[in-house]
Amino acid sequence: MSEDQGAGRPQRWDKPFGPTSMADADIDRVLALPSFSSVEADEFPKDLPLREIIANDGRIQRFSRGDIIVRRGDYGSSVFLILDGAVRGLASEEAERAIAPADTVAKKGWFGALAQLWRNSRIPEFRSSVKYQSDARDGAKGFRLSVNRAIVVSPSYVGLNRRLGRAKSGEPAISESFAGADQRANSPEPDETFVTRLEDIDALIDQYNTFPIAAPEMFGELAALARSPRGATVFAESDIVEVVELRWQALREIRRWSEGFSKRIDALYRERGLITHLRSSPIFKHVDQATLEIIAGQTVFETHGGFEWSAAFQRARDQAGHVDSIIEQEPVIAEEGHYLDGLILIRSGFARVSVTVDHGQKTVGFLANDDAFGLEEIVASWRGEGDHKLRRSLRAIGYVDLLRVPTSLVEQYLLDGLPPELLDDTIMAKQSEIADHAQPFKADAETAEQPILDFLIDNRVINGTQTMLINTDKCVNCDDCVRACAATHDGNPRFIRHGISHRNFMVANACMHCVDPVCLIGCPTGAIHRSTTTGNVVIDDATCVGCATCATSCPYNNIRMVETRDANGALIADDQFMPIAKATKCDLCAGQQGGPACERACPHDALKRVDIRNSKALGEWLSN
Amino acid sequence: MAQQLTVTSRRRVRNSTITIIVVLVFGWVSTLYADALRQHEFLDGWVLAAGMIVLACFNIRKKFPMLDLGKASTWTQIHIYLGFFTVILFLFHTDFDMPIGPLNWALWVMFVVVSLSGIIGLYLSTSIPPKLERGSERILLERIPGFRAQLAREVEDLAMRSVVDDASMTISNFFTDTLHHFMGRERNLLDHLCGSPRKLSRIRQDFANLQRYLDSRGVEILREIEDRVVAKDNLDFHFAHLMVLRLWLFIHIPATYSLIFLACVHVATAYAFSTGAP
């Protein structure tokens, strides 16, 4: 290997979280926070010092009053520790609805739908330039939101947020007045990001339930650890709020090496989320509060696999050209034949259930949110029919966040009162039926389902709730589906009638509206979000800044970046003459009559939007 | 037995039964109509005209995907079975006899063209898609020219490389004499539609025969070329079938509109020359 090659190898912290690594003085401020009081630097390995973790996986951010720091529903990839100021979270569904992007596309009437025939633009990806003259929009209940460019500067923040000026007729407008311009000249290259600001937070606080969080508390740790959606929107309440934001990687490292920090985080999780989570599982329905607290006190919180599974999956697929051997890369959570030390509850992500057959693993199902693993074995052992050994293996498909309830507690507190339907031989299936819309895909080795199951899991298609499947035995390539999509999206089809195939079905390149939508991670403006009314993943075109983060993150290549054009067909460009791009994808025909036009337009019933976890519907459709 | 039927089979049985019942009911009504000393051709004719209009509306429904006009697959089923019903109705209407006069002949011919093209289209739509699994991947019709051009370039490059690497003209001559023509555009379409592998087999025999003149490097290049020739043959196979799947509609739809026009003229003339009550 040449020296050049060695010198060019990318390293973990080549690009720190902030524009530059944090300065020593700022690291000292972070370490002085109560959350770090029990963290000792010498607990960390020499090649992974605590200060380096904070310096490179952390950044100081400053927000102004009203700035939204995290939004409910966004997928968490960082935790926030408040250095200065106070923030406030929204405590009710009504409050969240009030500030949510007005959902959005009103249902078209008959004439409005028909009018698309002549109103659709002949220019591909046409956008009205009026949209770009105002970057403010109203929330659902009239709370005005504005999207501002904010500057994140570390180590010394110089306050370069764009400020709101007043345009004529009292309308808020964005002004270009930069405070602290002198300092900027001496500062490192700023990193530009986008902040959405609530403009009348006093009214919001008056009208809705909110909760305060002040320095030096932390927030966002649950979502960051579990990569689950943020539970509440949090915005800056004081004029200046200064926080240190730590990437999830830092959170995991510090938690791993510092027992004190780990205990603190676990305690926070137990206090804020664990009991609620346990209560939602049918296995714990019959348990009283006191017992639940005992169980919660001894429940272990685990994560398996990599957060950035989508990138790893894409790499594996691209390198090998297929995904048949991907099971070998999946971390083992529990192994067949080993001692079962606890009941495993999946909190987020997916896990593959497999059994050993000769020299390989045969997939027999997969588990997702709220599914349990190991109960069957514990029950068998409790009845004297087993020996606490696992009959199946469990592997992390991508990233899995789980809870492990010790076997002794399950036997002591849970089994006696467990509903009979959870104690019979089909215990797993029964439990899943009780769980809302969750039925692990069961495959019988004697049927043709096994290869289908392998295909769906290996290609991570199990993530889809509205996956576009095309029966290739029926599809005549008429393209009516594509034309229907274009007709309902201003002349631009939002999917490609092509994709990975197995036997007689194809998974087309159309947004699957995933259970775990990794495309949401990292969107700087929240333009890609779950619809508050339908739960579908949609893109707000007005707030999309064209950064392509979502398109890069999507493991299925179902988001496309397009360059926008004006009424003359010319590319719309910014003041640097760079074309303005937008992320586009299937929105399930939001606002259109009758649901997805592609499915309705197929004359041969060859195209269907399928929730892959609904194995019954999937099986019926495939066997037609 | 009934439990073993797929949804498609069950639907086929149901729709066929409904169609047969409707035909029987119509036959009975038509008999009553004739017993009342009325001309059954007027009843047949108007029901036939209405049926044809509904059939033609299927294409119109496709033009309005933004409206909630029901699933196209439901329309397809109605189109198929109503189509069979109108064929039977047409036979009643013509008294199972050949037409008289040029207008009626034109109408008769056009109806036969529309019906036959529809039935053939139905057969093609159900028989061709499963065949397209050949080659493991579905290929979009629009992408075939691009793929073919890419393969042609690669084959030409390999043939040229053989001259340099192998110091032999065998492969380049084979390319000039045979492969250049084969790779130039879609070939052997009729053979593909008939399911005959004859042409590809002959080319592959040529490949086998050439090996005796080549060293190991030449054989390696020849195999790479052969892989691409097989891939190109697969493209031709897809192209032939995908084109047929599209082309039958170019007969069926224009003929339908011509038929409706002729039917309008027929109605006008029928009433113009009718006598007494229908």
Image (spheres, coloured by chain):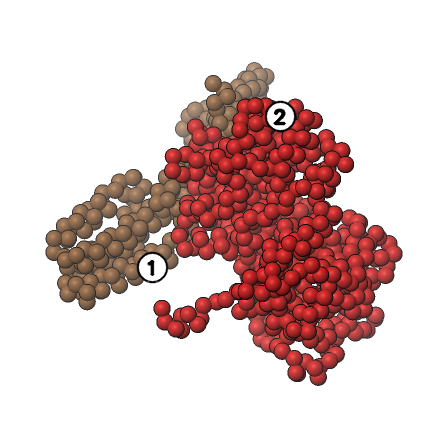
Chain colours: A red, B brown
Above-or-below relation of B219 to A386: below
- Quarter of the picture containing the C terminus of chain B is top right
Q: Residue at x 14, y 58 (%)?
A: B215
Percent x, y of residue B199: 23, 46
Closer to the eye: label 1 or 2: 2
Crowd rating for badge 1 (residues with CA inside 10 Å; few <14, some 14–19, many 20+): some
| Viewer can see residue A558 | no
Disc marking residue B150: 1
| Viewer can see residue B195 | yes
Give the residue number, with chain letter if any, for mark 2.
A423
Residue type at mark 2 is Leu
Q: Secondary structure at mark 2?
A: loop
Q: Residue at x 53, y 29 (%)?
A: A387
Left or right for B41, reference A35: left
Write down the chain letter for disc 1: B
Left or right for A88, reference A382: right
Left or right for A210, reference A293: right
Q: Nearer the viewer, residue A244 or B241?
A: A244
Percent x, y of residue A441: 53, 35
Check if mark 1 and mark 2 are on a common chain: no
Disc marking residue B27: none
Residue type at mark 1 is Gln
